[in-house]
Amino acid sequence: MPEIVVAAQGRTVTGKNVNRRLRSQGLIPGVVYGTAKGSIAVAVSPKEITTILRSATGENTLFDLDLDGKRRKVILKEFQLEPLKGQILHADFYEVALDKTLEVKVHVELHGTPVGVKVQGGIVDFVTRELEIECLPTDIPEKIAVDVTALELGKHLRVSDLTPPAKVRILTEPDVVIVHVVAPRAEEAPAVAEAAPEGAVAAEPEVIKKGKAEGEASEEKAEKADKAEKKEKK
């Protein structure tokens, strides 16, 4: 992989107004930290940072930040985007030591078509798309490939089932599910009410009929009791 160098300017004045002026000049504010001297405020070109983000290694790209003629090995730790246009507004860089491990997140990439999809009619449910790993800066993989060809319907792969790249230790919990094959959900057909024939009188609900019948029966009982009471008086 060719060496990447990003030019940076040191800045001593910070604040919203200064940041606006920087952006009007085609630069964005940034901070370098992880150094023994503490954090350093810088200004860089957003185009160069965008190029790095779009590369195969993305945020985990190891590159040189050229600050006043002195190069520092860094990775892009955090960045802020403008919500509507997606332009980069701010970037944080972490200076690394090539002989010390660091913790980063790496994307998971699925390879192959599961037998549970191809033969058994299931669908893939990709649950965990990033894994946290630990390794030296020069050993950060572009991605972690997972072969799902043998995955059957109702089966899953966990972190514990993976074989990490050489010199890489996975920090994500072993029981975390990466992917599984599930049965497709059956679509329930909406119940369609049958249309009554034209001119037909709609039947009364059963509950109402029952209510009327009970009411009529109560009236009959009351009449019989009244007649019996009159006979006894006679």
Image (cartoon, rainbow, N blue to C red):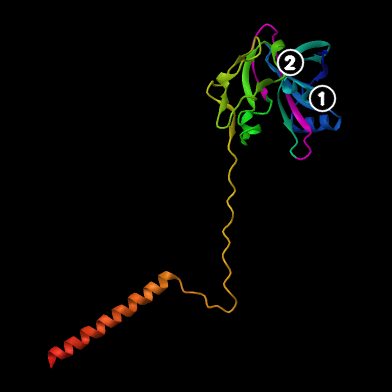
Residue placed furthest toward the right: 25
Residue 142, horizontal then vertical, whole percent: 72, 19
Image coordinates of residue 181 in percent, x first then y, are 59, 32
Q: Main secondary structure of the magenta part?
A: strand
Q: Nearer the viewer, residue 25 or 132?
A: 132
> Quarter-wise, where is residue 192 in the image?
bottom right
Residue 71 is labelled as none
Q: Is residue 60 magenta?
A: no
Callout 1, which amino acid?
Thr
Do the residues under discs 2 and 1 have CB atoms within 8 angstroms?
no
Alpha-carbon span between mark 2 and mark 1: 15 Å
Q: Is residue 95 left or right of residue 178?
A: right
Q: Which residue is mark 1?
A: 51
Q: Which residues are magenta?
A: 84-108
Residue 125 visible in rendering: no
* Mark 2 residue element: strand
Q: Residue at x 70, y 16 (%)?
A: 141
